[in-house]
Amino acid sequence: YVANVRNWTLNIVADEHDITDFSSTTAWTEYMTGLKRWSGSYECFLDDTTVLVLPGYGTGGGGAAMVLTSSTGRTFSGDAVVTAADVTVNPADPNVCTVNFRGTGALTVA
């Protein structure tokens, strides 16, 4: 499903855990990575022919497949749930919808 998407953002975050202890041999704090998560948003134009489909919205569970493709062809894919959708309507401009999503499970980069 492509809904006249004009831009998107993707945030990938990993928790960090401080593992510095008395046996640490330097004056620097030591960390290990923890759980990872991803989220983001995309903005699309609404027109008279394209039905707005919100991936994972109302599916009652694990979300829906989402693939984001960069201008260089790199893809980011995984299951996501929609957390919010904001529609902006102005008679002088195209109707725009901003969709926020959160990944559920792994994100694959190819």
Image: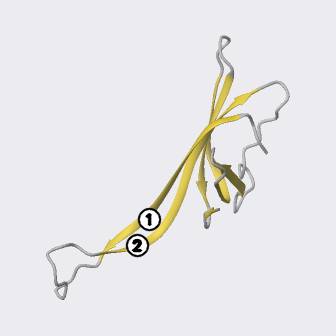
On screen, residue 38 versus residue 89, left or right, reads: left
Reply above or below: 73 against 61.
Answer: above
Farthest-out residue, front: 72
> What's under tag 1, amino acid-wise?
Ala
Q: Which mark is residue 33?
A: 2
On screen, residue 15 versus residue 42, left or right, reads: left
Q: Residue at x 71, y 52 (%)?
A: 56
Q: Quadrant of residue 59?
A: bottom right
The residue labelled by disc 1 is 14
Dot placed on the residue nearer the N-terminal end, 1 or 2: 1
Q: Residue at x 65, y 11 (%)?
A: 92
Q: Which mark is residue 48?
A: none
Which residue is at the front of the view, 20 or 28? 28
Quarter of the figure that contains the N terminus: top right
What SS does tag 1 mark?
Answer: strand
Residue 29 lies, in percent from the top left, at 22, 73
On screen, residue 40 versus residue 50, left or right, reads: left
